[in-house]
Image (cartoon, helix red, strand yellow):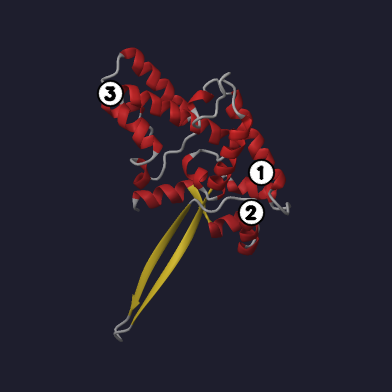
Amino acid sequence: MNKNLKYIKENFIELEDLCKATNITKQQLQTLTDNELIPKPSYEITNNYTISSPLGDKETISETHKYYHKSIIDLIAKNKGLKNSKDYKKNLKAEFLETFINSKDNKYGYDNLLNEDGKVDIDKLNIVFEQEWIHYLNGIYGICTLNATGSEIAKKEIAVKKLINFNQKHESLILSDEDKGILESLNTQFNEVSSLFAPYQRESSSRGKYLDRILKHNSLSALVKK
């Protein structure tokens, strides 16, 4: 099996299987999506088939399969009785805000969020969350985080920005033993919340650009998460 298909099928759940696992119909699943109570699928795989026969005829069929992050199973059980996303969004936002505000490294997060006193500008952070909410509903955090939680969204942002900052200082250099230790710590922080990404995405993802590359450059390939 193709390595990208293998990754998606092993780590995500297809729509038909999801409906069976949660005992809901496709229409009910769509209603939950429309009401912003669950994210959209993170991946779609389209299969094209050509049917031919000795009669010289031919028929082409296309099938699209949608794949969701597996955490959506518990999310459906939790949210299927709700009519709108108000409380669900409120809870996700509270988790996101609390994690970001209380992080000792929030200076590395979203640009221009800290006031002169070093405290987070809550109004700006609220605006940031609305943008992240859209990404979340589009299935993006099912791709790049382990569990697609509000806390992980905040932690991943900080982890990525810390890696970017480290890369800007050391990208073209061979790291000292001390800096290798720092990179190993950043690697651990990133892996605590970030997924592997499908193989075709890996090189261009935050993992590929800001972590895999610098690890390999410094003979730390053993730390590259497989």
**Which of pointers 1 and 2 lies earlier in the amino acid sequence?**
2
Residue at coordinates 35% horizontally, 36% vertically from top-left?
Answer: 208
Note whether 174 is above or below 190 in the view shown: above
Determine the CA span between mark 1 and mark 3: 42 Å
Picture disc at residue 89: 1
Where in the figure is residue 225, as x and y percent of width and height? 38, 32
Front residue (pair 171, 19): 171
Amino acid of disc 2: Thr
Q: Quadrant of residue 218?
A: top left
For the point 60% across and 28% down, the residue is 121
Could you give the CA–CA distance between mark 2 and mark 3, rounded to whole angstroms? 46 Å
Q: Is residue 213 left or right of residue 100?
A: left
* SS type, badge 3: loop
Mark linked to residue 218: 3
Q: Secondary structure at mark 1?
A: helix
Mark 2 vs mark 3: which is more N-terminal? 2
> Is 44 drawn above or below residue 106 in the view shown?
below
Say whether residue 169 is left or right of residue 42.
Answer: left
Visible residue check, residue 70:
no
Q: Closer to the N terminus: mark 1 or mark 3?
A: 1
- Of the residues tagged 2 and 3, which is closer to the observer? 3
Rounded to the nearest angstrom, the CA distance separating label 1 from label 2 is: 21 Å
Report the amino acid beneath label 3.
Answer: Asn
Residue 15 in picture, x, y percent from top left: 54, 58
Query: Residue 203, located in which quarter of the rendered image?
Result: top left
Residue at horizontal 40 percent and vertical 72 percent from the top: 61
Q: Which residue is mark 2?
A: 22
